[in-house]
Amino acid sequence: MKFIKNTAGTTNQDDAALIAQYKSTGSLELLGVLYNRYMHLVYGVCLSYFKDEEASKDAVMQIFEELVLKLRLHEVQNFKSWLHVLTRNHCLMALRKMSKHDTVSIDDVFVENADFVHLDIEDTKETQLSIMEKCMDTLPVEQKISVDLFYLQEKCYKEVAEITGYEMLKVKSYIQNGKRNLKICIEKNSSE
């Protein structure tokens, strides 16, 4: 699955240079060159969520369409990692809309730890998501805002600090503590 041919002089440019050029010109060709570097990875992530080749191919194109706007709005330091998070979130939201799959792993949304949550197979993803939303509401305000901006709205630490007015070290602390408190709450609620 090839997306776009490399335009002259762009194959040797790093991601940051292509992003800067895209932001200044709005050239979809430049964005295509950048996306083409990681499209196989995006497809792999989509395939792992959807378990369907056609749905995954569709998602790859939808994610590119999201990039057109989102890359202009966000300050991206590491494109590959940022794209992975964007892809994962896109897949999770698509699965939530489809409402026909049994489970969506909550730990994929917030925590890298695979032992994070053990829900029965019969539980639906809506139940899991409502537990997560309920637990978000139990967090102290600073943690809730910071976690929401960082994970759900995909803001970097600097952007969270600018939006909230919190100091950078406080933002990192709120996110770390919020993530831990969220994990504890979800584990407690999922075992009940």
Image: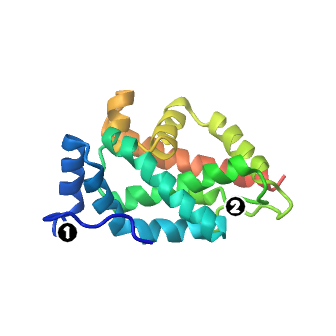
- Residue 43 shows in this picture: yes
- Residue 183, image x and y in percent? 63, 53
Crowdedness near tag 1: few (<14), some (14–19) or many (≥20) residues, C-alpha within 10 Å = some
Identify residue type, mark 1: Thr
SS class, disc 2: loop
- For the residues labelled 2 and 1, the Cα–Cα distance comes to 42 Å
Mark closest to the chain's N terminus, 2 or 1: 1
* Viewer-closest of 11 and 19: 11
Left-right relation of 49 to 120: left
**In the rendered view, would you say 72 is above or below 184?**
above
Q: Which residue is mark 2?
A: 117
Q: Measuring 59% from the left and 56% from the top, which residue is drawn there?
A: 91
Instruction: State the image quarter where residue 171 is shown.
Output: top left
Q: Which residue is mark 1?
A: 11
- Residue 191, image x and y in percent? 81, 56
**In the rendered view, would you say 136 is above or below 67?**
above
- Image quadrant where one finds the N terminus: bottom left
